[in-house]
Image (cartoon, rainbow, N blue to C red):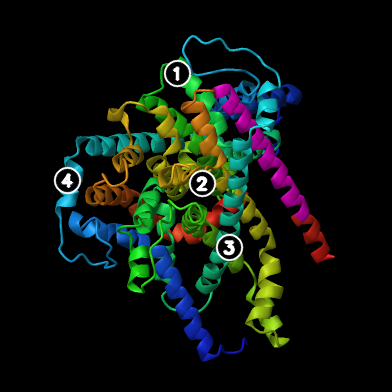
Amino acid sequence: MTVIDTPAAPTPSKKPAKRIGARVRAQRKEAIALVIPALLPIIVFSAIPLISGVALGFTDATLARNAETNFVGLDNFVALGGDTRFWGSFGIGLVWAGSVAGLTLISAMGLALLLNSDLKLKSLTRILALIPWAMPPVVIAIVWRMIYNPNSGPLNGTLEFFGIPGVNWLGDFSTALPAVIVVGVWSGIPQTTVLLLAGMQSIAPEQHEAAAVDGAGAVRRFWHVTLPALRPVIIAVTALDFIWQFNSFGLIYVLTEGGPGGQTMIPPLFTYLEAFRNREIGYASAMGNVLVLAILVILSVYLVNQFRQNRKVRA
Amino acid sequence: MIARRPRYATVLMYAVLAAYLVFLGFPLLWLLSASFKSSRELNSLSVNLIPIEWDFSNYANALDRQNLVTAFGNSMLVAIVTMIVAVLLSMPMAYALARLKGRLRAAGTVWILISQVFPTILIIIPLFLVLRSLQLNDTLFGLILVYVTFTMPFTLWMLQGYVAAIPPELEEAAEMDGAGRFTILRTVILPLLAPGLVATAMFTFVSAWNEFFLALVLLQSPELYTLPIALRSFLGAEGQTQLGPLAAGAILATIPSLVIFGILQKKLTGGMLAGAVKG
């Protein structure tokens, strides 16, 4: 029961019990009226699709018209277990999301430290640092395609200036995944920096001063004061970054469409093609289920591990 | 108290800061410069940021493409309606989340977290079927409904943070005077919430304006394409792409989001987090 905590108004009444009952009922009605407008679209366009998405994974549904849909039990999952292309894509997804989350954390930490220091040009940097956040993912992908372009991009232009042969960054098997990871990091830096900066600014300056009095240099202060204090923020940020990147779609779809030869075929892209190009939505939903499960397992292992270490640090 | 930093360290820090600035700022600068370059220059291996010969026709060319202008209009319509509807629908629930205790609050928070974990790809398939059965697939109205739903975890979370920052005593005073819940909401909460509402609305606009995946799946007719989808179809096969007009179109697509982020800059690096994190 949801109760609005209001001070108990001393109401002089002959039948107090009945009045309170009416009041609670009125409050319940209020609460329902407040929640319904937002809840309705959530149920129709989020909760129901979510449940039917999970259910679809156990059927042989296709997008073809007039096709019959049958319950097939675990058939999709058994087939998926032996689908090497899916697991290859899954591995690429792990490398992609893990690298982007890790490298974003390191780059954002560096930037946040600089922004938290006494340097000039900080406000300019703060504004510039928001650019990747504001740009639509499609535009980000278009710009980086231009930068990576083997025949007219500034990257190869610079290499040529130094007499180094150019590289087909997004088209070469060995460079395509690292190249898209750089773009992922670039677009992820702003949010992570803002969150880390907020965490840094909540550390009391006295802590740093006390450490300085004890003779700790900048590096040791970072290691023994800043880092432990930021630990909860770091855990939350990397977990969120990992999830977002593992589920991301637009950036890589426009950059490489999963190519060359599937080198950047992250799972959401693979699933999308299965659902809307091969029209096998039952099988694609089963993939979606596996992805959700994988994220939950990875996330809980990570979080449990981190919190256990946290307790050890505190102890 | 803290010992002065040696000079070389300060120089090093500025060098690293400059490297960050180049890394973060260069792509937008390159896009801007490409939008003013001639196609001859665009197709050569050049590294100059300032065009050798300025070509302003790219913007005219981009706007000449009927589908890009239509897409701009579609995106504007979708983003503005999404923004208004999402904020209007979220406000009462955000108030409830911030003020009511107990199960509702817990359930709301859990749902907001869950919505972050589930990949859109799992929801998009049945969502496509739901919209098809409502005959709303391939319509801007359907897309708006989906956007409203998908931006709601965020708007709810932000707004409830702003509501929580308003002291409950103000409402209690109004309640003593005999005001009902909706009168309180309108006369006490709404005016105090205005700055938070504006910030939330702007964020909602940007996320609808920038969105790509849902629009890609739900829209099939080219005349309904939003700007990101139109730009992507512009890209076409490598070599045939007209880079100049594409860059110009991409710049035009970035301006609204960039302006809003500029306005929200202060909130982004400070207040918003304090407001949103504090539950």
Image quarter hosting the N terminus of chain B: bottom right
Q: Secondary structure at mark 3?
A: helix
- Residue ID for mark 4: B61
- Residue ID for mark 3: A196
Q: Position of residue B163 (x, y in %)?
A: 55, 46
Q: Nearer the viewer, mark 4 or mark 2?
A: 2
**Mark 4, other Cα within 10 Å: few <14 / some 14–19 / many ≥20:** some
Tell me whether marks 2 and 3 sit on the same chain.
yes
**Mark 1, other Cα within 10 Å: few <14 / some 14–19 / many ≥20:** some
Q: Are marks 4 and 3 in contact (CB under 8 Å)?
A: no
Amino acid type for the residue under numbered disc 2: Thr
Query: What stretch of residues is rendered in magenta?
Result: A281-305
First of labels 2, 3 by sequence position = 3
First of labels 4, 1 by sequence position = 4
**Mark 3, other Cα within 10 Å: few <14 / some 14–19 / many ≥20:** many
Q: Chain of mark 1?
A: B
Q: Nearer the viewer, mark 4 or mark 1?
A: 4
Seen from the viewer's position, the closer of residues A106 and B172 is A106
- Residue ID for mark 2: A264
> What is the C-alpha distance between the residues marked 4 and 2?
33 Å
Q: Position of residue B260 (x, y in %)?
A: 36, 52
